[in-house]
Amino acid sequence: MDTSGHGYFNSYEFRHILYMLASQKNGIPGFRISNATFNAIVMRYSDKDGQVRFNDFVSCYIKLRTVFDTFRRKDAYAQGRTRFEFNEFAALAMYS
């Protein structure tokens, strides 16, 4: 949550709200990402000061939701790994 009231999330708030939303009833089941992945997400969605604006947060959440939902459908045995053909991967990366 934007605890500072400035209209953006810092990286701590960003991580907190992602995990909070993911754990909700209609959230992202099994949502876990490494620190390296989180840092890449912050680099992509934050400005030069490390601040994530609300519209960028929404875009990020939608993309994460799409990626996790697609992966879960492909991971038939819920082992945290699956296979993608190149065209499937490219379509997912370009679409989401």
Image (cartoon, rainbow, N blue to C red):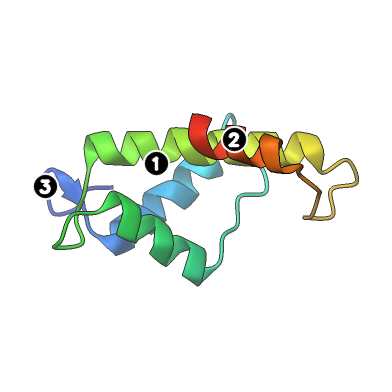
Question: Which quadrant of the structure image shows residue 65?
Answer: top right
Residue lying at 51% horizontally and 29% vertically, measured from the top left: 95
Residue type pointed to by label 1: Cys
Query: Circle 3: is it few (<14), some (14-19), or many (20+) Cα within 10 Å?
Result: few
Residue 92, disc: 2
31 sits to left or right of 84: left
Q: Which of marks 2 and 1 is nearer the N terminus?
A: 1
Q: Is residue 28 visible?
A: no
Residue lying at 33% horizontally and 53% vertically, measured from the top left: 44
Which is more foreground, mark 2 or mark 1? 2
Residue type pointed to by label 3: Gly
Residue 77 in the image, given as x and y percentages of width and height: 90, 46
Residue highlighted by disc 3: 5
Q: Can residue 53 be seen in this view?
A: yes
Which is more foreground, mark 1 or mark 3? 1
Residue lying at 84% horizontally and 48% vertically, measured from the top left: 78
Residue 71 in the image: above or below residue 14: above
Mark 3: secondary structure: loop
Residue 46 in the image, given as x and y percentages of width and height: 24, 54
**How much space separates mark 2 and mark 1, taking CA atoms?**
14 Å
Tag 2 near tag 1, CB within 8 Å? no
Residue 20 in the image: above or below residue 55: below
Q: Earlier in the sequence, mark 1 or mark 3?
A: 3
- Asked whether 79 or 9 is in front, the reply is 79
Which is more foreground, mark 3 or mark 2? 2
Residue 75 in the image, given as x and y percentages of width and height: 82, 44
Residue highlighted by disc 1: 60
**How much space separates mark 1 and mark 3, taking CA atoms?**
20 Å
